[in-house]
Image (cartoon, rainbow, N blue to C red):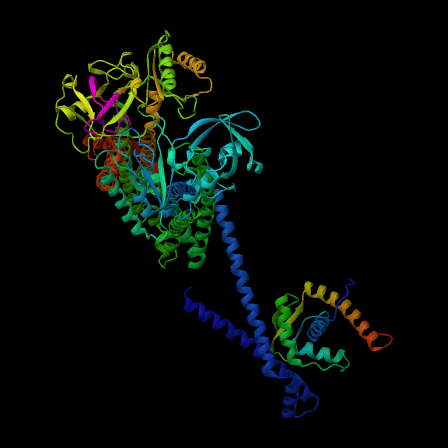
Amino acid sequence: MGWRRWLSARWEERHSAERRIQQEMLTHLEEAADDLERTGVPPERARAQARERFGSLEQHFREARRVRVRALRRARRSERTHGLLHDVRFAWRSLRARPRFALAAALMLGAGIGTATLLSSIVDTVLFRPLPFADPEHLVHLRGPYLTLAGGRPFPSTDEQLDWRPRIAQAFEDVAAYHPMPYSVNLSNRGEPVEAGLTEVTGNFFSVLGQRMLLGRYFTSSDAAGDPATRPAVVGERLWRSHWGADPAVVGAEILVDGRPHRVLGVVPMTAQLPASVDVWVVMGESWDTTYVHGARYFRFVGRLRADAAPEVVEADLRGLQADFETLLDGRERPMSVNRLHTDLVGSASAPLWLLLGGIGLLLLIAMANLASYLLVRSRARHSEYCVRAALGAGRRRLLQQSLAESALLSAGGLAVASLLASWAVGLVRSSDLPLPRLESLSVDWRLFSIGLVVSCACAVLFGLGPALYASRPNVAAGLGGDARSGRGGLHRPREILVIGQIALAVVLAGGAGLLGRSYAELRLVDNGFRSDVLTFATRLDDGTFEQLSDAHAFAHTLVDRLRALPTVAEVGASTLLPLAPRNNFAIRYRVDGQPEPPDDAWTAFSAMTPGFADALGVRLLAGRDFTADDREGASPVAIVNRSFVQIHFGTRDPAAALDATLREAASDDGPAFRIVGVLDDLRRGGPDESTGPEVFFPLAQRRQRAEFFAVRPNGDPATVVTAARTIAAELAPTLPLHDLRTMEQRLHRTLTQPRVLAWLFRAFGAASVLLASFGLYAVVTYWVAARRHEIGVRMAVGATGGRLCLRLVAEGSARLGAGLLLGLLAYFLAVRAIDTSLLFGVGVYDPGTLAAVLGAVGAATMIGVAGAARRVVRLDPVEALRSD
Amino acid sequence: MGKKQSSTVSLRGTLDLMVLGVLTDGPQHGYAIARTIHERADEEIEVEEGSLYPALYRMEERGWVRASWGRNDNNRRVRVYTITAAGRRHLEHEREAWVGFSRAVAKVVGLRGG
C-alpha cells in the first residue's frame, strides 16, 4: 500500500473512532436528559443537570479517545507480527515441500560463501596481515653471501677485511643474524630424547624483532655474554605442546641440546616466530664478532631501522643500502638483497595466491550463476501461484514479505553451511603443509565472511523477489492466462545470458588449467643435469664432532670409500653443495689466464667434492677427467668447470678448449691458480625453472670446506643402501646423525610442489566449471523444450519429425554455446594479461595449441549437455504435448 | 483464591469492578450501566458518568467485555456491552481482593463488622 493510502487509512480510522465515542457520549447525555425530563425537570435544566452528572465532556472524551487509539494500534501490530510469523511458517512449509530445491540452493549458497571466505582468509593472512613483531614496517631483511663480521674473515677467504657495519649504523638501530634453515638436534630433558629443529641466532635477535612471548622471556645480548654453563635457550610453542604437554614449568627448565646443557627462558608463540619451522633457538658462537662459519652454513640478517624513519625514507634507505653494498663489494662478490622483512617472507607467495584467488573467484561466479538460474526457474514456476494470490487480494507488501521470508530461510541455511565449511576448510588448510608462509596463523576472517554473506543473500533476495514484484503489478490477469505457462516472457532471457556467461568463464578457467598443466608438464621434462634415482643425505657440520678440518675430511672420504665398496652401490661421493638442497648462493667471479675478462655479472658458484661425486649424481663429464685420490692436499691445485663456464670464458661450446687452462679468482691478481682438468655438463641447482650458470668445482681434500652432502647411486634396492649408510656412519662417528635422506626425485618433487598444486587445482576448477556450464546449458535447453511443449506438439502433429526438431534444438543450443565460446575467448585474452608469467614455464599465454584444446574441450563437454536435452524432444509424445497446456 | 491484594485497588479498579458486577445481570449500554450503579449503590457513591466510557473501552481492549450495536428503549442506536468469560473470572478475583481490602481498611480505621 502506498504511504499516502496508509496515511489516509490511519486518519479514517481515528476519525471513525472519534465519531463513535462522540455518538456514545451524546446518546448518553440525551438519555440522561430524557430521564430527568420525565421526572418533571424542565428541558433546559435537565440537559444542564445531565452534563453535570456526566463530568467534564472534554476530559472524558480525550481519555476515551486515547484508549481507543492505543487499542487500535496494538491490534494492528499484533496482526503484523502474526502475519510475519505466518509467512515464515508458510515459507518453511513450502521449502520442505521441495526439499531438493531448498537443499541445493542452500548448499550452493553455502559452498560459495564458504569457499570465498576460505580463499580470502588465506590471502589476507598470508599477504596482507602485518608481521606479528613490534613495528614490522621497520624490519629489514638482508640476504646474501657476504658474511664479514668485524674482525672476522669472510668466507671464502679473500684477503680483504671489509666491514659494512659502520655503513649500516647510520640507517639501523641494530642488526641481528640467524640461520634460516634449522637443523636437527637431539633434545632431552627428563625422558626420551626428541628430535627438534634448531637455529642459532645472535644475542640481540629477539630484541631486534620485538618478539612477543607466550611464556617467560627471550634471551638478550647480556644473557648471551653470560656464563657459558647456563646457555640460554628459547623453545617454540609447537615443541612445548608436544613434548612438555603445555606445562608452564618449562620456563627455567634445564634441557640438553645434543648433550650440552641449556636453560629455557621462555616459549615463543607459533604464530609469531622466525624462522617459521624452528623449535629451539640458541645463541650462536660466543659473540657477534668471532663467529666462524663452518662449511656451507649461511646467515641471514634482520635489521631494525631507526624508529624515526618514515616509510618513504625507509624505502630510500633500503635502495641506498643496496647501492652501498654494490659499491662496497666493487664487483668482488654478488651483493646482498635488501628488502623489507615482510616482502622477503611473503613475496614469493603473492603471484600464485592471486592466481588462485582469481581462479576461485571465477568458479564462484559460475556457481552463483547456477544458483541464480536455479532460483529464476523456481520463480518462473511460482509466477502463476503469485498471480493467484494477488488476485485473491494479497497486497504487494504481503507478497514481498512472503518471498522475503523464503529467501531469508534459504540464506539462513546457506549461512549455516558456509560457516561449517569455512571453519572446517580453514582448519584443514592450516594443518596441511602447503608451501605457504604464515600458514599457522590462518583463521577464518569473519569480516570477509559477512561481506560474502551480505552479497549472496542480496542475490538470493533479488531473485526471490522477482515473481512477487512482477505479480504485484496491476496487470495480474495477463499473468494468470496462458502467457505464464507458455515459456514466453521475460524470465527466460536472463537465464540464457547467465549460461553464456558461465560458458565464457569456463573457457577462461579451462584455459588457465591448460596453461598451468602444460607448464608443469614442461617442467617435468627439463633435463636437470643429474639423475633422479640418486639417494642423498646430509650430515651436520657445526656440532663440534670434528674439531680439526682433517678429521672432517677423513670422515667424509672414509664414508665414501666404504660405501663404494658395497655391492649395492654403484658410485658415491661427497660435496659441499647439492642440487635442490638448501644452499648459500656463494658466488664470486673468476678469470682465466689468457682469456678476456669475464662480464660483470658472471657470478660463479663454487663447491668442493670428492672424486666420484659427479658420477654418482649422474652429471655428464664432457671433457677431461674427474678428480682422483691424487688430487689431495699438497698436490698441484686443480679444478673442474662446467659448460656455461666454458661458454662465458672461452667463447666456445667446445669443452675441450678449457682443459689445462689456468683459473684464478677475479678479485685477486696474485691469488692461487688452479689448473682446469675437466668439464662437466650444466646442473640446475635450483630446479627446472632456474637458469644454469657458470660453476667451478674443487677437490674436497684441497679445500678448507667441510663436505655436508652425500650422493649415492644405488645398484638395486635403495633401502639396503640407506641402512648400510647409517651403520657405517654410526661406526665412524656415533654422535653424528644423518638426516634429510631423500632421492633426487623426491627433492625434485618437493621443489615442484607449487606448480604441481596449481596445475592440479586449476584442473579441478576447469573440470568443475565445464561441468557447471554444461549442466547450465542442459537445464536451459530442457526448460526451453518443456516450455514449448505445446508448440512442439503442434509441429509434430503437423508433420515435423523428431529428428528435425532435435536438430533445431541442437542448433539453438549451439548458438548459445558459440556465443559463450567467443565471449570466453575474449575474456581469456583479457584475463591472461593479469597472470604473472613467472608462474608459467615453457608455454606462452597465447599458445594456439592450448587455446584450441581448451575451446574444443569446453565445446565438446557442453554439447553433450545440449545433445542430452535435445534427445528428449524425440521422446515427446505429440498427443500428450498438445494436451499439456 | 485468597491472594492478598495490596492497596492497588484504585478508583479505576473499583469502577471496573462495579461495571462488571452490573453486567453479570445482562448486557447493557453505557447510560443504563451508569443508572444501575447509581441505583444499587443506594445513591451513596458519586460516579462521574463520563468516566465510564474510558473504563469500558479499556475493558474491551483487555477482553473483559464485548461490544456490539443495539437499540435502547427509545430506539436509539447504542453500543451494548456484554461481560465475557475472562471478565467473569476477573470479577471473581477482584471481589475477593475487595473484601480483603475493605476489611483491612476497617481494621485500620477502627470499625467493627462489615
Q: Residue furthest top?
A: A567
Q: Is residue A558 above or below residue B73?
A: above
Q: Position of residue A792 (x, y in %)?
A: 29, 39
Q: Position of residue A600 (x, y in %)?
A: 18, 34
What residue is drawn where x is 34% and y is 54%? A478
Q: Nearer the viewer, residue A101 or B81?
A: A101
Report the number of discs. 0
Was residue A670 drawn as part of the magenta stretch in this picture? Answer: yes
Indicate left or right for A390 with A160 as reference: right
Q: Residue furthest right?
A: B112
Q: Majority secondary structure of the magenta segment?
A: loop
Q: Is residue A637 above or below residue B95?
A: above
Using the rendered view, name the quadrant where residue B43 is placed.
Answer: bottom right
Magenta span covers which residues? A668-697
Q: Nearer the viewer, residue A665 or A96?
A: A665
Using the rendered view, name the quadrant where residue A532 is placed.
Answer: top left
What residue is drawn where x is 72% and y is 77%? B36
Q: Is residue A275 above or below residue A546?
A: below
Using the rendered view, name the quadrant where residue A602 is placed.
Answer: top left
Q: Nearer the viewer, residue A607 or A693?
A: A607
